[in-house]
Image (cartoon, helix red, strand yellow):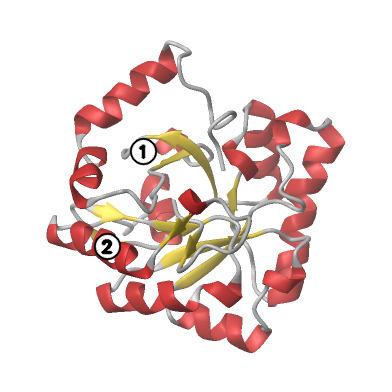
Amino acid sequence: MYHHVGAARPGEKERNVVPVATFREQLGCLAERGFEGVSIDRLAAALRGDPGAGLPGRPAAVSFDDADARRLGPALEVLSAFGFPAAAYLIADRPEDFPAPAEAEAMRSAGLTFGSHGLSHGRLTGLSGEEARREIFESKRVIEERLGAPVAHLAYPHGAFGPREERLAREAGYLTALSTRRGNRHGRGELFRLRRLAMRPYTTPRRLGRYLGLAWHLQHSVKETLGLEGRGGARGE
């Protein structure tokens, strides 16, 4: 899970902005460890068990929350160099962050998938049922209309979700929903609560290597089971 690649802007959380050189180092670490980039569509198909769908031995899917088309260029260059696709989740009420239709098509051709990050980036679990429905359904419609292509993937704003949000995401027609649950492995029943690794400017190759291990995954799975770690509430993005 990334937000922006490049330089932090005034007032922006520096931990959400990874310098280009660090981004290159992080993807290089994945490649050196034998990881292959996969699209969110391919991941979804494999987890659903679709006929003929499969994944490489060590798959990795890259995502960007709060995506801004004006800031994706440097990241796309590095992704292309390593052969990694990615998914960019747009906030529907921020039209200034959207690419023009022709630009969006070029980005899709380069391996980018656009998804929804909600209508206003409101924390869904704190909204009424109707408000949450609007955030999930209307954002999909708006992004599809502006980009002229289907939107099949959702990233919960702030990572916050529960059974209601999962149900609404399914009803809206999404194929997956990303959370901020910590972990590096997914089960077939987790398509609407996919885990992620939050990548920071201080995520060194050594730290990333630890994040990719089974022990780190199990540590956070146990914490979640014991109620010691939420579903993206306090620490979500």
Foreground pick, 116 / 91: 91
**Circle 2: element type:** helix
Q: Amino acid at mark 2?
A: Leu
> Which residue does the image show at 27% across and 54% down from the upper left?
59
Q: Is residue 194 above or below residue 218?
A: below
Is residue 214 shown above or below 1?
above
**Secondary structure of the residue carrying numbered label 1:** loop
Residue at which label 2 appears: 27
In the displayed structure, would residue 59 be above or below residue 79? above
Q: Which residue is mark 1?
A: 186
Judging depth in this view, the residue of 40 and 4 nearest the camera is: 4
Decide: is 231 above or below 150: above
Q: Name the residue rendered at 22%, 57% in the picture.
A: 30
Number of other residues with Cα within 10 Å of mark 1, as a class: few under 14, some 14 to 19, many 20 or more: some
Q: Could you tell whether 164 is left or right of 222 in the image?
A: right
Q: Is 132 positioned to the left or the right of 160 in the image? A: right
Q: Sort mark 2 into few (<14), some (14-19) or many (20+) by Cα contacts within 10 Å.
A: many
Q: Position of residue 147 (x, y in %)?
A: 68, 75
